[in-house]
């Protein structure tokens, strides 16, 4: 069963997360376009990555500032990677710290 983690972001951190996830989603879509000319296996793998990123992007769009969020570790890691790649300073750095703190504390087991 997946483990869930609690995290709360402020408005600036959520903005950084949304921008970073949007940028990564766009990147994955561009890579999907490029993979379409290659092998079927590479295209399928890239389509899965693009779909996963679209799901994360959609998920973070519904987060509210100050809201306690229960989220899987895998999703937090994906968000953290987006932040490291696209918003590594300022509010992005603050969000990364909150993610790291959250990952060290399991909130709920199912």
Image: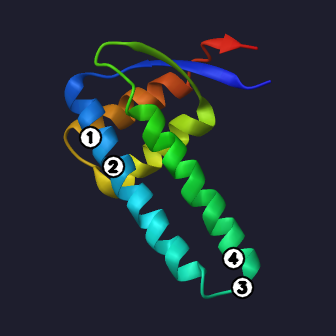
Pointer 1: what residue? Answer: 16
Pointer 2: what residue? Answer: 20
Looking at the picture, tell me which residue is in the foreground, 12 or 49.
49
| Contact (Cβ within 8 Å) of mark 1 with mark 2 | yes
Cα distance in 3D space between marks 3 and 1: 35 Å
Pointer 3: what residue? Answer: 39
| Contact (Cβ within 8 Å) of mark 4 with mark 2 | no
Cα distance in 3D space between marks 4 and 1: 30 Å
Pointer 4: what residue? Answer: 42
Cα distance in 3D space between marks 2 and 3: 29 Å
* Discs 4/1, front: 4
User: Which comes sooner in the sequence, label 3 or label 1?
Assistant: 1
* Discs 3/1, front: 3
What residue sits 53% from the left and 41% below the top? 77
Say which quarter of the image contains residue 105. Answer: top right
In the image, residue 26 lies at what x, y percent?
Answer: 39, 61
User: Which comes sooner in the sequence, label 4 or label 2?
Assistant: 2
User: Which comes sooner in the sequence, label 4 or label 1?
Assistant: 1
């Amino acid at each position: 069963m997946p483990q869930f983690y609690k995290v709360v972001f402020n408005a600036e951190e959520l903005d950084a997360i949304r921008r970073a996830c949007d940028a990564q989603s766009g990147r994955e879509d561009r890579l999907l376009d490029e993979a379409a000319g290659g092998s079927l296996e590479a295209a399928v793998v890239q389509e899965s990555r693009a779909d996963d990123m679209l799901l994360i992007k959609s998920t973070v769009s519904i987060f509210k500032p100050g809201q306690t969020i229960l989220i899987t570790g895998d999703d937090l890691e994906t968000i953290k990677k987006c932040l490291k790649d696209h918003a590594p300073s300022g509010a992005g750095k603050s969000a990364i710290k909150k993610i790291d703190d959250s990952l060290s504390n399991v909130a709920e087991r199912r």
